[in-house]
Image (tube, helix red, strand yellow):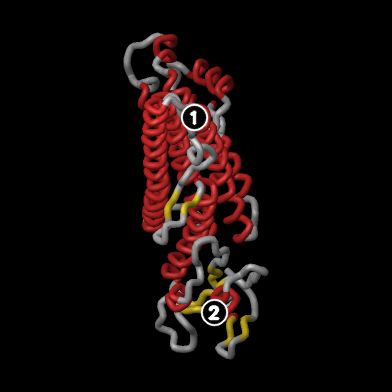
Amino acid sequence: MNSELLSLIRATGYLSDGDLTDQARYDLLTPSFWRRARALGYDLPDLKRKLWRAAGRPETFLLSQLPLSEIEKAVRASEKEKDPRKRIKETAAIIALLYKRGEKAIKAAIDQNLDNPDRLRALTDRIRRELLVNAASWLGTSIPGLYLAGSRAGLLQGPHAKAAQAMATQEMNRFREVDAQLSRHIEEVIAESEKRRVQATLAGKKVDYTGLRGRVIGHKTIDGKELGIADYIQMVAITAARNVFNTGVENSMHQKGNDLAMISREVRVNSCGACRQWAGKIVSISGNNPNYPSLQDARDANVFHPHCIHFLEDINEDRYSGTGHYRGGAI
C-alpha cells in the first residue's frame, strides 16, 4: 500500500485510540481526505468500502485490506522489466503521463475562467496539490526500486536506505520548483487578465484574452526558454530515474570494492557526440586507475546529461582483461 495514503489516514484520527463508534471514526475521513486519496490514484468506491469495513479494527487488518494505488501498480509492473534502460524509461513515463493530464486540466481551467480569477485560482491550486501528491507517491515507490535495481542489494537498509531517501528528497525539490513556477504563471495570467478587463471596460470594448489561453509554463531555462509542464517533467523524471539507478550501481561498487564500470553501449540516431564517444567505455569509479578514464571524466564530457538514457554497469574485474577486452559477466 502507498505509505502516503497511510499517512493521510493517520492524520485524520481514523486510527486513533479514542473511544469512537465505527461511524464516528469513518466520518473523520473528510472530503479533503477523499480528494487527496483520489489524487493518489485510488478507486474511491472501493476504498470507501474497505475503510468502512476496517473502521475500529486493528491497523494490521487495515493494511491487509487496502489496495495498491495506480501509481504503485504501474511502478511494480515496470519493475518486471530486466533491461535497465527500458525500466528507467517506463518508470519515468508513469509520472510524465500524470503531469501531462495535469497540464491539460490547468489549461482548461485557465481557458474557461479568465473572467473569474477566484475560481481560476481555486481550481488550479487543487490541481497543483494533486500533482505534488502524485510526485511524492511516484518518488516513494520508484526511487527505492530503481536504487535496488542498480545496487542489486537484497534490502534497502543502512547507508543504502539513507542514500535513496536523500535522492528522493532532492528530486521532490525539483517537483516543488515546477509547482512554484506554475503558481507564478497562474498569478501572472490572473494579473494580466484583470488589467485587460479594466482597459476593456474603460474603452467600452470586449475583453481580448489573446495569448493567455492554451499556454502553461512549467519551467524557464537560464536562457529564457519556456517549457510546458509535461515536457519538463518528462526530462526531470527520466534524469531522476537514471541518476537513482546509477547511484545504486556506484554505491554498491564502493561497498564491494569494485572500481570498474561500463557505460551502457546503446547509441541512437539522435545520440549526442559525447554519448557516441563514451558508449561502451570502461571507467574508473574512483578515478585512481591510470589505465582507464574516470567516471568524472565522462560526466565532465556531458555524458548522463538531461534526457540521456545511458546507465552504468558494474563489471566483474576478473573477467575484464587489461588489454581493453571485456569478456562478459556483468554482475
Residue 286 at x, y = what percent? Answer: 41, 77
**Circles 1, 2 touching at the beta carbon (< 8 Å):** no
Q: Which residue is mark 1?
A: 63
Residue 15 located left or right of residue 50: left
Residue 164 at x, y = what percent? Answer: 42, 54
Q: CA distance from mark 1 to mark 2?
A: 46 Å
Residue 230 at x, y = what percent? Answer: 54, 46
Residue 52 located left or right of residue 73: left
Q: Residues within 10 Å of mark 1 (few under 14, many from 20)?
A: few
Residue displayed at 59% across by 87% down: 324
Q: In what element is the residue under mark 2?
A: strand
Q: Where is 265 relative to 76, above or below?
A: below
Q: Label 1 amino acid?
A: Leu
Residue displayed at 58% across by 43% down: 97
Q: Residue furthest front?
A: 203
Q: Where is 218 relative to 281, above or below?
A: above
Residue displayed at 50% across by 62% down: 306
> Number of numbered discs present?
2
Closer-to-camera residue (220/126) = 220
Q: Which residue is mark 2?
A: 282
Q: Residue furthest right?
A: 269
Residue displayed at 45% across by 52% down: 156
Residue 38 at x, y = what percent? Answer: 51, 28
Q: Label 2 amino acid?
A: Ile
Q: Residues within 10 Å of mark 2 (few under 14, many from 20)?
A: many
